[in-house]
Amino acid sequence: MKKNPVIALPPLPLGALAALAAAVLAACGGGDGGERNAKPGYLGEVRQQSYDGSSDDLLTAGLGRSGLAAATAPGFADALRPTAAELRRLAIHTNYRAMLDMTAAGGYGTFYGPNVDAQGRVTAGEGKIAGTEYIAFSDDGTGRKNVTLMVQVPDSFDPRKACIVTATASGSRGVYGAISTGEWGLKRGCAVAYSDKGTGAAPHDLMGDTVPLIDGTRATAAAAGKQAAFNAGLTAGELAAFNTATPNRFAFKHAHSGQNAEKDWGRTTLQAVEFAYYVLNERYGDRNVLGERLKTLKPGNTIVIASSISNGGGAAIAAAEQDTQGLIDGVAVSEPAVELPASPGVTVQRGSAALPVVGRTLVDFTTYANLYQPCASLAASVSGSPYAAAFAAGFASAALPIAPNRCAALRTAGLLSATTTAAQAEEALQKLRDYGWEPESGELHASLAAFEVAPAVSVTFANSLSRASVKDSLCGYSYAAASASGAVAPLAPEALASMFSTGNGVPPSSGVQLINNKGKFGAARDFLSVSVNSGVADWNTPGALCLRNLVTGSDAAARALQAGVDETRRNGNLRGKPAIIVHGRADALLPVNHTTRPYVALNRKVEGAASKLSYVEVTNAQHFDSFIGLPAVLPGYDTRYIPLHVYLNRALDAMYDHLASGKALPPSQVVRTVPRGGMPGQAPALQPANLPVIAGTPAAADRIEVGAGAIRVPD
């Protein structure tokens, strides 16, 4: 019997062998035709850490409900050299508390919190969630971007009911900056995809030339190399010259990366979703004949909700607009920062009155607030508002008349016409109302001015949008620690070591102050500095005017910022995705007339009948839920305002039910909440009656009417 000859085949590369094996299996009916799971090219080294849900966990870093509620923050064994685990624990404690009212009377532990389960039931547990955390940089190979992406996968994740929720960092915070949003997803058994969106809390210390790493620990810039979470990018000569001229300064990523990060917030949020898919398929994906994981979990069998708050909410909206791959199924966000087109062609009406100024960009209305808010905070018509008395005592006393000096400086600049401080304050307040702030926002100006919110945001965004370097000292501003008198001083090394955890990325924060380099008597803390032209401390009016000119002017510096703004504008096209936006009517940081209201009108103009966007405007709600829980510092927030976070959770519930079971989304409406009342600092406990549900069929008087390019919100 003759045997068939043996034919020797040349060895095949592994990739070719895999392709051949897949083809043979497919031909024989045994192939699944699946695509191999591949790590995205923009991802660097992926670190992972599993948590047992007892000693440590995904949501509370082992602190549990009780530990997060504790005002005393977790400490370090060595304050100068905290470990990555210690920094993570403190970062979660700080960021969770920065977003929410942590008092029991304000709703923590009953309406929200780790111990409140996915069905809203209050449990006796600590709410710790076991699972695995994955973290990596997204970069182009240069080490200059290094956006931090993170995915948390709870042990309760079920690939048969796969879901992903995004929680892009709010404000300018680091990657844990939206952990309170991530909580909703973790409780549902969803993977949570986080991005710091190119911002972050830890700075480049220019004097010491140390930088943060991805886990918050610090290293010299030379040792860190491309693994620095942020490096200001100065040459050795530039760094030496800068330190000689302006010692003890810091550079922060959002302000000084030169990347105009906001233009990429949508893209990096989408990258976080892609990272989540990669992680999930590495864990749960089917295997091919070679044992390689396949892309088994994909958009067709996984629910993906883009969510977050504030700047993170704006990033979720941007991601939905840019989602050409169909990665996102729905959007549920709170108080989003969203930049509209230069001429959106929309109208906004409240009751029977049309609003004359709407749809301005964040840097526009924030630099406007930066000018007028210190003066407006003295208005007698809002003297009973939270912190107004303290503001007047601290900023308008005979010894330190900073706010009255700002009023006078605005008159000198031709921006106010009244001749007395009292009249100037009322005029400034009216200017804010005329520029788009709702009357309900007037009671918030004093507390926001005292906390330097508008100058902090204005300086950060002006630098970022202009792609300014720290060495440019845009409009004369810089960041440094300061003495009690306002003079620049070295920062305590312990504060720098922990800033990854304690900072918010937008100084003033964690001992770093906003500095006016151009003070008459030298560099000094911004609001204490003496202006060269007036010779008095007027809250650095020249700096505020310079920032405003970047928005309204036509010189080279203004054109640079305006070009950056144009890169961040959104188009209103959510690609037919169902979406819910909740926003507090009283929001004074991101006024509804410049953000959500005109965006909803723009979306209807762009998408027409295909629009699936619902808008829920909540009365007696404002931007900072955490302020409600500070009755000793801000008495009156507790009596006036309810936690908007409850309505974000309800919006997420509604979106999940819609995507999972087809339940109809609620129509656009005003939800009329009931303040807790009582005495400031002693408000009674929040009750269900204070927090009406989002109605499936709202009353006619509560229904928001949306047409093509027009929105009418009832009084």
Image (spheres, rainbow, N blue to C red):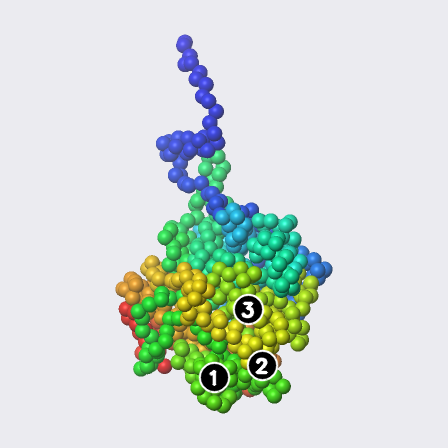
Mark 2, secondary structure of its residue: loop
Residue 683 at what x, y percent from top left?
55, 83
- Find the distance from the CA under tag 1 to the CA under tag 3: 22 Å
Q: Which residue is mark 3?
A: 476
Of the numbered discs 1 and 3, the one sitting upstream in the chain is: 1
Residue 715 at what x, y percent from top left?
36, 81
Left or right: where 72 falls relative to 123: right
Amino acid type at circle 3 is: Gly
- The dot on residue 536 is 2
Residue 322 at what x, y percent from top left?
38, 56
Amino acid type at circle 1 is: Arg
Up the image or down, 295 lies above or below 56; here it is above
- Find the distance from the CA under tag 2 to the CA under tag 1: 15 Å
Structural crowding at the residue carrying mark 2, measured as other residues with C-alpha within 10 Å and reported as few (<14), some (14–19) or many (≥20): many
- The dot on residue 411 is 1
Residue 581 at what x, y percent from top left?
40, 68
Task: Give residue 31's quadrant in the image.
Answer: top left
Amino acid type at circle 2 is: Val
For this orientation, the residue located farthest to the right is: 78
